[in-house]
Amino acid sequence: MMIGFYAVIARGNMVKKMVGLTIFQTSVFMLYISMGKVANGTAPILTGGAATPYANPLPHVLILTAIVVGVATTAVGYALIIRVYESYGTIEDDELIKMIEAEENEEASDA
């Protein structure tokens, strides 16, 4: 989890930030799936036999949904990075900030 967090905070390249977010997101998925694991747990299907520990299927179902949403938002993030590159010619944070500040200063001096 901390590797992904570090990549988001420390890197200036937007693609590397997206990779860091994906690593962070995957670690959260693994955390929730591990909480749904029960030692010697079985599927929650009642057979009328002796009481046995059952594994909770809800975390697994929720994570399946989260994976689908995560893939979709990652695709949107990469699409936005492509549009930024087409518009500005770079995907580095510091270069983009300088370009945007230069545009704002230019607009302010024109007004």
Image (cartoon, rainbow, N blue to C red):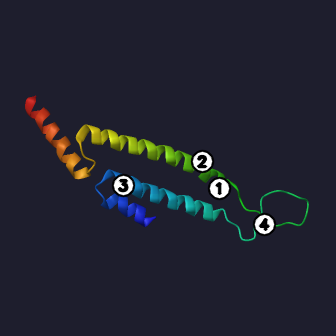
- Mark 3 sits on what residue? 17
At mark 4, the secondary structure is loop
Q: Which mark is residue 53?
A: 4
* Residue 29 quadrant: bottom right
* Residue 49 quadrant: bottom right
Q: Earlier in the sequence, mark 4 or mark 1?
A: 4
- Mark 2 sits on what residue? 65
Give, as a three-letter code, the residue at label 4.
Pro
99 left or right, relative to 74: left
Give, as a three-letter code, the residue at label 2.
Thr
Can you give x and y, in whole percent of width and height, for residue 92 in the image?
Answer: 26, 51
Give, as a three-letter code, the residue at label 1.
His
Q: Earlier in the sequence, mark 4 or mark 3?
A: 3
Q: Nearer the viewer, mark 4 or mark 3?
A: 3
Q: CA distance from mark 4 to mark 3?
A: 41 Å
Can you give x and y, in whole percent of width and height, for residue 11 in the image?
Answer: 30, 59
Q: Residues within 10 Å of mark 2 (few under 14, many from 20)?
A: few
Can you give x and y, in whole percent of width and height, for residue 24 in the image?
Answer: 46, 59
Residue positioned 89% across, 67% down in the render? 50
Q: CA distance from mark 2 to mark 4?
A: 25 Å
Can you give x and y, in whole percent of width and height, for residue 111 in the image?
Answer: 10, 28
Q: CA distance from mark 1 to mark 3?
A: 27 Å
Give, as a three-letter code, the residue at label 3.
Lys
Given residues 82 and 27, the one toward you in this image is 82
Residue positioned 32% across, 38% down in the render? 83
Residue positioned 45% across, 44% down in the render? 75
- Mark 1 sits on what residue? 60
Residue positioned 51% across, 48% down in the render? 70
Above or below, 2 relative to 67: below
Given residues 68 and 107, the one toward you in this image is 68
Q: Earlier in the sequence, mark 2 or mark 4?
A: 4
